[in-house]
Image (spheres, grey):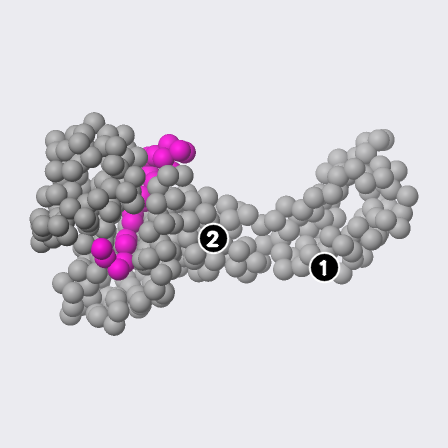
């Protein structure tokens, strides 16, 4: 559906996007994840034709953005971080105006506005001034604007920025519903949003792609460690270390705390392995009393911090 090839953008001597390559399949929800200033917005602006790349190319349905920019814009819908709305207009009047610009008229226009009002959940505010709406409703109106001519690809730049938790959940549901029919590219620095909404995540840092895959695949492929926490009685650290450190795959047995009544240890091991059954069998063959036994998996937050730290 979309191929991004060696995409690069310079602002004078500053390289904002550096040799970025990725593909997006039809019907996929792709999250462009990164810290502020990583190059997410610049990448999206080049995808939508708002900015010209310094070098590289973008192809949408086989069309090159260098030669077919108008054709590509016709199949894209774009919602920037700050939705470009006319705050003095009523919501219905605004959407009616957008439809007229897109040359959607007559019964088709009314049907499209009704469809978008239902999909974006704005029926109850259709006759209110946009300036009186909460930011969550403004985002919904902006989303309806971006989808007016039923684009095949929807590009959303920080669609939940500045929203409260309830509004974030509502916008996320709308995006998931839209994603059943369209290809969606969204940028965000909210990790939970990317994990809950996107089929695939591309992490960008300092203009470069540092990871690409589903949330589960990223957790498994980044070389992170799982941590297993144990609390036992009738055991000392030396004995526990000798018993558990010999299990194949265990990298480290660390004492968290040790008292006369309880010992707490953590076991670290490769994220691709599940050593819980073997650890349990070892403990079962002792006279230890097991009080606590749980595993902490590599989190997307830890992966994100590791991949995007400056050094």
Q: Could you tell which of marks 2 and 1 lies nearer the N-terminus?
A: 1
Furthest toward the top, the residue is: 132
Image x and y of residue 157, in percent: 29, 47
Instruction: Identify the element where label 1 is drawn.
Output: loop
Image x and y of residue 195, in percent: 46, 49
Q: Residue at x 34, y 64 (%)?
A: 26
Residue 44 located left or right of residue 106: right
Q: Number of labelled discs? A: 2
Location of the N terminus by quadrant is bottom left
Using the rendered view, name the quadrant where residue 174 is placed: top left
From this view, report whether residue 308 is shown above or below residue 72: above
Image x and y of residue 261, in percent: 84, 31
The residue wearing badge 1 is: 249
Q: Which mark is residue 307?
A: 2
- C-alpha distance separating marks 2 and 1: 24 Å
Q: Which residues are magenta?
A: 150-168
Front in this rendered view, residue 184 or 123: 123
């Amino acid at each position: 559906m979309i191929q991004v090839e060696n995409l690069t953008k310079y602002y004078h001597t500053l390289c904002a996007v550096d040799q970025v390559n990725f593909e997006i399949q039809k019907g996929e929800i792709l999250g462009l994840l990164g810290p502020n200033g990583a190059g997410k917005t610049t990448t999206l602006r080049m995808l939508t034709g708002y900015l010209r790349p310094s070098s590289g190319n973008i192809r949408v349905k086989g069309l090159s953005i260098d030669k077919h920019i108008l054709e590509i814009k016709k199949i894209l819908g774009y919602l920037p971080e700050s939705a470009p709305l006319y705050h003095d207009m009523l919501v219905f009047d605004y959407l009616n105006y957008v439809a007229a610009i897109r040359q959607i008229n007559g019964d088709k226009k009314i049907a499209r506005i009704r469809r978008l009002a239902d999909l974006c959940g704005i029926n109850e505010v259709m006759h209110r001034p946009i300036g009186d709406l909460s930011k969550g409703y403004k985002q919904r109106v902006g989303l309806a604007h971006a989808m007016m001519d039923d684009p095949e690809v929807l590009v959303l730049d920080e669609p939940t920025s500045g929203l409260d938790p309830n509004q974030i959940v509502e916008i996320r549901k709308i995006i998931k519903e839209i994603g059943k029919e369209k290809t969606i590219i969204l940028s965000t620095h909210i990790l939970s949003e990317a994990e809950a909404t996107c089929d695939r995540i591309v992490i960008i840092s300092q203009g470069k792609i540092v990871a690409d895959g589903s949330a589960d695949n990223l957790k498994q492929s980044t070389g992170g460690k799982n941590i297993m926490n144990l609390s036992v009685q009738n055991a000392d650290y030396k004995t526990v270390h000798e018993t558990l450190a010999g299990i194949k795959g265990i990298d480290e047995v660390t004492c968290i705390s040790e008292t006369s009544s309880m010992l707490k240890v953590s076991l670290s091991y490769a994220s691709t392995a599940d050593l819980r059954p073997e650890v349990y069998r070892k403990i079962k063959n002792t006279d230890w009393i097991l009080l606590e036994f749980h595993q902490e998996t590599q989190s997307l937050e830890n992966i994100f911090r590791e991949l995007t730290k400056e050094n």
